[in-house]
Amino acid sequence: MHDLLFDFISKYITLSNAEKENLISLNIFHSKKKGTVLLKQGQHSKEGYFVLKGCIRTYYIINGEEKTTAFYTEMEGVTPNIVTSGEASEYFIACNEDSIVVVSNPEMESEIFDKFPKFETLCRILSEELLAKQQIDFDQFKTTSPEQRYLNLLKNRPDLIQRIPQHQLASFIGVKPQSLSRIRSRILDKKV
């Protein structure tokens, strides 16, 4: 479990054994069962999550219907905007699979940054990468059809097609499950 994180970090910065031990001592590694809700609408929280193994999903409930906005899988992190705003959450974060996550909060991060300044550099780099990815995802969602969004998923995130229930995939690309079935049929017909 620890090695997964350390292997990922090593792509950006080098950690000493003392730094690794210090991270382990913070008790940041948590196993979560499929279906565990990490954040509920209306809840306040200071926790951010980094997925080592598994999949977590963000979604809203609008007029009784779930609207999926994102999936986070291995080596991806999500920090709810409420961590900095202090407001109540407008959405949910839940585990779509049994997951191993790193759980952090601003106080813990501040302590780590004070002891090990290179972690601040790592977090800045990861934040910049995440922001760029989210901007690209947002732009693609706004400028493409649902069929093209599905094709983009097939190309860029094929793991999600196998891991995520159809109704959640449909919600994620902005259609009803029946429409997703029609999109899949059209794509298969074009391949024949």
Image (cartoon, rainbow, N blue to C red):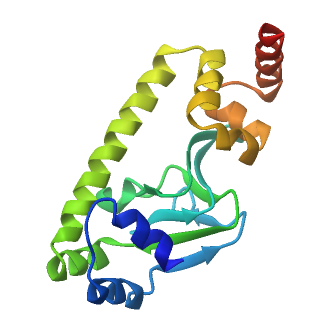
Q: Is the C terminus in the top left, top right, bottom left or bottom right quadrant?
A: top right
Q: Quadrant of residue 46?
A: bottom left
Vertical relation: 72 (above or below) 17: above
- Residue 86 sits in quarter: bottom left
* 150, above or below 87, in the image: above
Residue 66 in sight here:
no
Q: Position of residue 12 (x, y in %)?
A: 28, 60
Counting from the top left corner in percent of width and height, residue 22 is at 32, 88
Residue sitting at x 36%, y 46%: 130
What percent of the width, then of the height, locates residue 84?
A: 29, 59
Residues 63 and 48: in front is 48
- Residue drawn 47% across and 22% down? 140
Which residue is depicted at the point 68% across and 37% down? 63
Residue at position x 48%, y 76% from top?
3
Which quadrant does the N terminus fall into?
Answer: bottom right
Q: How many marks?
A: 0
Q: Is residue 175 visible?
A: yes
* Location of residue 32 in the rendering, given as x and y in whole percent from the top left corner: 64, 72
Q: Is residue 103 left or right of residue 40?
A: left
Question: Residue 157's quadrant in the figure?
Answer: top right
Residue 140 lies left or right of residue 57; in this view the side is left
Above or below, 48 relative to 135: below
Q: Is residue 37 above or below residue 32?
A: above
Which residue is at the front of the view, 178 or 4? 4
